[in-house]
Image (cartoon, rainbow, N blue to C red):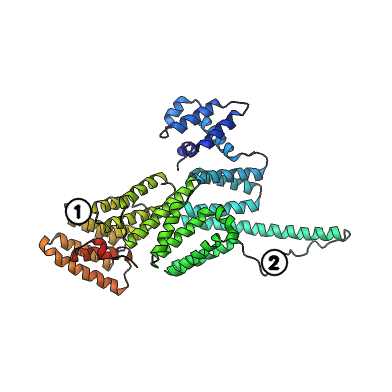
Amino acid sequence: MTEHDFLYDLVQSLDEGELRFIRNFASARRKKPEKLLALLKDVRNAKTFSPKLLKEKYSSYGVAKFKLKQLILHSLRLMNTEENAEQRINVHLENEGILYRRGIHYQAMKELNNARKIAEKYEKLDRLLQILQLHQRRLIEYKTKNLVEEVQENMDSIKAVLARMNREIEVTLHYQQLFAQYRTQDHQALDGTEAPVLPDDLPDVVEESFQTQVVRTSVEGLVARSKGDYEGAARATKKALELYEQEAYAHFLEDQHVRYKLFLANYGIYLVPTGQFDELKRIVDLFREMKDPDFNGEAETFQNRVHLELLWRTNVVELDGLEALEKEIEAGMDKYQGKINAARQLSIWYNLVVAHFLNEDFEAVWRQLERILEHKRFRVRREIQYTVRMLELIVSYELEIWDLPDHAINRVERFLQRNDQVTPFKMTVIRHVDRLVKTPLRERAAVFSQWSEELHALREEGQVTDDLGLTLVTAWADWKTKGGRLKDALGKRP
């Protein structure tokens, strides 16, 4: 999100009730802001953002734009912003929440940084800790480039604040102890050098907060996932869902619904390697039924639902209605593009590739492959980037769209060599596609038969690192050998 888009996106995100309130709030002031209301109307009615036209119509456009932003945020906050440091921090944090829920993340981060500056200036350590923790969550959600370094830097800031808070609490508790003694023991002289009571006298047993319990399940799930233990990851994630679904914690579910959806989506993903596809379909239906109050929630629900639905469809080979789903995905990608991260985009596009491939719609496959290959700058889900190069060769063969097949094959082979991705599976693809294009049509059946045997041998060895593409290409080679339907060659999963 760039700076010049901010006002337009903010105004477009308002619903009719909010617009009506802003107009009434502005009109109730002693100084009638006709110019601001006119600008509000023009920005609202514009189909696209055109600062050139607005600058021609409004003198001091930059000032008017700033004042309109302040008017909108003030109206949405409904509170005085200028009384003290605490209130000013609250204002910026509430602004951050408003903007974040509307998907306007660039300005939301600016509000968060403003809150941090005030907390640091006035040494509001508890608020600073709150702000830094929120900043850490936003980093995880927004960032890809330099993520590890920025998370570490912010974590160091959190540790420094915690150390200062710990000392502040020690000294405060020490003072309060001394004051209680002084007040109740006839103002007797006290030993001011007595050691602080914190942390030595902390209780041995402390009831864990809801937050602590949820984070503990996250740690357990992440460790299991890192080891390839998807059953363990599913169990840990289910624990988190069960916590949220307890009646005693209903208020946390309401307050943290976005986080709950993240656990639900992760749980759905872990169901795939464990073959629990009926349960996965139930989760897809839960996402489809969700009603979200804001842009941010809508975006989260959309991307999680279509990702899980594609996983379900490709694994049970349910391809009816695929064209309608693709149109829905394209519309959603366009609407929520600022909210959907690169890794999720690639996963959704790749699963569309798989679905169309199984449906034998190779033109649709090519369309999706081009979309993925256009985003070479993405440094995530590299296994997808490598697999689509194999599918590029296969679909090129199916559609007969190359004039110089050797050129495409050599290009892909060089790409794999540069990225240290020359594996037995990938080389079988390159070698046999090369053989196919050089073999007369009537003799190609033997090439497919030999290729199918080699792929099945690789699968039986169980040491292949190309699971993402091996199953799909093996099904294609079997289909070419035996005929019938490609999706039948893959077979429905249990």
Q: Position of residue 161 (x, y in %)?
A: 62, 56
Figure quadrant of the N terminus: top left
Check disc 2 and report the residue beneath it: 202
Toward the viewer: 210 or 194?
Answer: 210
Kindly indicate whether the residue at mark 2 contacts the one at mark 1 (C-beta within 8 angstroms).
Answer: no
Figure quadrant of the C terminus: bottom left
Number of marks drawn: 2
**Circle on res. 84:** none
Residue at image position (46%, 28%) is 55
Residue 319 appears in which quarter of the rendering? bottom left
Label 1 secondary element: helix
Q: Amino acid at mark 1?
A: Leu
Check disc 1 and report the residue beneath it: 399
Q: Position of residue 25 (x, y in %)?
A: 59, 32
Q: Position of residue 89 (x, y in %)?
A: 62, 45
Residue at image position (53%, 63%) is 242
Q: Earlier in the sequence, mark 1 or mark 2?
A: 2
Residue 406 appears in which quarter of the rendering? bottom left
Is 417 placed above or below 306 here? below
Judge left or right: residue 177 versus residue 133.
Answer: right
Toward the viewer: 342 or 101?
Answer: 101
Residue at image position (25%, 58%) is 412
Residue 96 appears in which quarter of the rendering? top right
Judge left or right: residue 479 versus residue 128.
Answer: left
Judge left or right: residue 160 versus residue 467.
Answer: right
